[in-house]
Image (tube, rainbow, N blue to C red):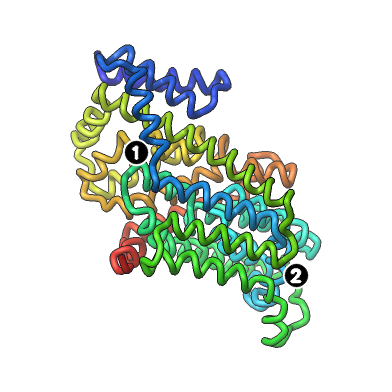
Amino acid sequence: MNEALIISLLVLSIFGFLAGGVWVGLTLAGAAWLGMELFSNRPAGDAMAITIWGASSSWTLTALPLFLWMGEILFRSRLSQDLFKGLAPWLDRIPGRLLHTNVVGCAIFAAVSGSSAATCATIGKMTIPELTRRGYPQDMIIGTLAGAGTLGLLIPPSIIMIVYGVSADVSISKLFIAGIFPGILLAGLFMGYIAIWSLLHPNQIPHADKPLTFVQKIYESRHLIPVVILIAIVLSSIYTGFATATEAAAVGVLGALILSLTQGSLNWAVFKESLMGATRLYCMIALILAGAQFLTLSMGYIGLPRALAEWIASLGLSQFGLIVALMVFFIVLGCFLDGISIVVLTMGVLLPTVTAAGIDLIWFGIFLVFVIEMAQITPPVGFNLFVLSGMTKKELPYLARVSFPMFLLMIVGVLLVYTVPEIVTWLPKNMTM
């Protein structure tokens, strides 16, 4: 049967299951089962059992629930309350003043969370009411928060990077290290935009607070110091080769528990809620991964990855043309699916083509995170927009409009890492193994 017809049937079955309210993981497994039964001689039940067990028993995947638990513990600590007090004195004298707390706060929390939605929600709970009370323009408060919240995916530890690393069989430690410079780059682009905008609209930025001495600034930031130390320990242990990503995640959980205990925010209820929250989220992700692995196997038996790779190769695209085409493809896909589903759905099909084009898989992982970040602020399924809509009671078209400049800056970021790939590849190539 024609490959285009098979693809159409699989896509229709996936969207049909999703429209019927079936969970994403079960949808992928169901579409895979249909593909195996209709277009392959391999027994579907046997293939499903072996594939799902293989996807679920990966030791590499152990890092994911641990990093999720670390983020859940710190989410319930006093970090969110202390973050603004610690950052405000350092940012009050640069153009844009406290609007930068959205970007810097998200960058710091991203290094302990790994989730875009959690980063956006945690920082937004703190900065939206405080910046509104101080008289900062609402469009800039919400727009910069929507963009900066996506740093939760790029700055390690990142849930998406772990999922991609497992799907593409590349080093998660190297992916984490590769995300550091691009994360700093993107945060710098956001802060640069805020500074330029504030210089062009000086009358919309409130006056600075009373200046503090250096010692007073340090004192105000005292609650941030333990979190910064925890981040440094986790990332440096991976960078130096002292610990694997999984071992570093275990250290992060232990550090988060100690930090929460010393802050006085750790009790049995917080411990139980954080553990259950991480367990629920991991179970959802694991189910999606298992279903996607089965779908990848099913498509492999049908021959779709080979057919798609041959079709793309027949287009004669340059490497840059392929990157642009994939960027548009992922952005469109992100209008309908979440980031994890995008990764696990597409990697089995696209990786042979990407490899044949001579694209480094570590670099491609960071590129993939960039475009998935864009999808977080594009309607109708932009997760950050949903989070902000719930927090601000604003409509999605308004939220998409005010976050559009951040979307354009992400495109600039993609072009920069394509033009200068060493932004991504230098640290992984030089990390101690």
Query: For the residues marked 2 and 1, what is the alpha-carbon distance in whole angstroms?
Result: 47 Å
Q: Nearer the viewer, residue 163 or 331?
A: 163
Q: Position of residue 116 (x, y in %)?
A: 56, 50
Quadrant where the image shows the C terminus = bottom left
Q: Is residue 349 above or below residue 186?
A: above
Residue, disc 1? 347
Residue 206: which disc?
2
Q: Amino acid at mark 2?
A: Pro
Q: Quadrant of residue 314?
A: top left
Of all residues shown, which one is farthest toward the right?
133
At 46% from the left and 51% from the top, the residue drawn is 63
Left or right placement of residue 377 versus residue 123 in this view: left
Residue appearing at x 68%, y 76% in the figure? 222
- How many marks are shown on the rendered structure? 2
Position in image of residue 72 (x %, y %): 62, 51
In the figure, residue 326 lies in which quadrant? top left
Q: Is residue 116 left or right of residue 360?
A: right
In the image, what residue occupies the spot 63% across and 60% down? 257
Horizontal placement of 325 versus 63: left or right? left
Secondary structure of the residue carrying tag 1 is helix
Judge from the rendering whether residue 395 lies leftward or rightward of residue 151; answer left or right.
right
Residue 199: percent from the left, percent from the top?
62, 71
Q: Residue at x 62, y 74 (%)?
A: 225
Q: Is residue 210 above or below residue 371?
A: below
Q: Is residue 31 above or below residue 425?
A: above
SS for tag 2?
Answer: loop
Q: Badges 2 and 1: C-beta atoms under 8 Å apart?
A: no
- Of circles 2 and 1, the one toward us is 1
